[in-house]
Amino acid sequence: MASRSEEDFCCPVCQEVFRDPVVLSCSHSFGKVCLKSWWREKQAPECPVCKRRSSKDPPPNLALKNLCEAFLQERDQRASEALCSLHSEKIKLFCLDHQQPVCVVCRDSEKHSNHRFRPVDEAARQHKKELQETLEPLKEKLKVCEQVKVKFDQTAEHMKVQARHTERQIKEQFKKLQQFL
């Protein structure tokens, strides 16, 4: 398989590698779960990228699903073969004190004496969980900001309408006053 970056296989909604990708009539692809949740939030079956209306039940994108599965398999294989740049040993541990992946030789070196270690997968899961927990409040703030923006836009439009109405009234009063004089 040609070398591809991970972003080629990421859902535009969740930024994760596609799981059960579906394709919309506009040709954009999304994870099925992400798309359904996006539609529930927006209350409209539209493409999250181009906003084009779409059918409620988009077909699966089997070609993309196969490519993503192959990519994940290749990535996992490469990750399991990650080698230490100092000792050319497989990296299996994560130093909690230095917050970096290490091999067993690094663990036993003076640089990491009396440090705490975890298996790389466990540390990666923990870091991913922490990132997602940090991301949740940010998503909520973004949602609130979008709601506030909508209200501000509505208020601005209302003010424009009021300004036009007031201007029309002033012109009418001016005409009446001019006719009176």
Image (tube, rainbow, N blue to C red):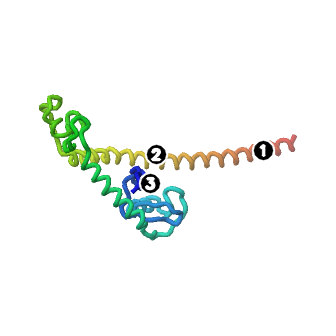
* Foreground residue among 92 and 10: 92
- Most extreme residue toward the top is 110
- Compared with residue 8, is residue 91 higher up or lower down, i.e. above or below? above
Task: Indicate the secondary structure of the residue bearing disc 3.
Answer: loop
Residue 13 seen in the figure: no
Figure quadrant of the N terminus: bottom left
Residue 119 seen in the figure: yes
**Mark toward the viewer: 2 or 1:** 2
Q: Position of residue 48 (x, y in %)?
A: 49, 57
| Circles 2 and 3: CB atoms closer than 8 Å | no
Task: Indicate the secondary structure of the residue bearing disc 2.
Answer: helix
* Foreground residue among 102 and 171: 102
Figure quadrant of the C terminus: top right
**Mark toward the viewer: 3 or 1:** 3
Q: In terms of sequence position, does the residue under pointer 3 or pointer 1 come before the other?
A: 3
* Foreground residue among 147 and 59: 59
Q: Quadrant of residue 20?
A: bottom left
**In the image, what residue type sits under mark 2?**
Cys
Q: Which residue is mark 3?
A: 12
What separation in Å lies between label 3 and label 1 (alpha carbons)?
52 Å
Q: Position of residue 119 (x, y in %)?
A: 18, 45
Task: Indicate the secondary structure of the residue bearing disc 1.
Answer: helix
Q: Quadrant of residue 175?
A: top right
* Foreground residue among 166 and 180: 166
Q: Which residue is at 24% across, 37% downward?
A: 100
**In the image, what residue type sits under mark 3?**
Pro
Q: In terms of sequence position, does the residue under pointer 2 or pointer 3 come before the other?
A: 3
Figure disc tally: 3
Q: Which residue is mark 1?
A: 171
Which numbered circle lies on residue 145?
2
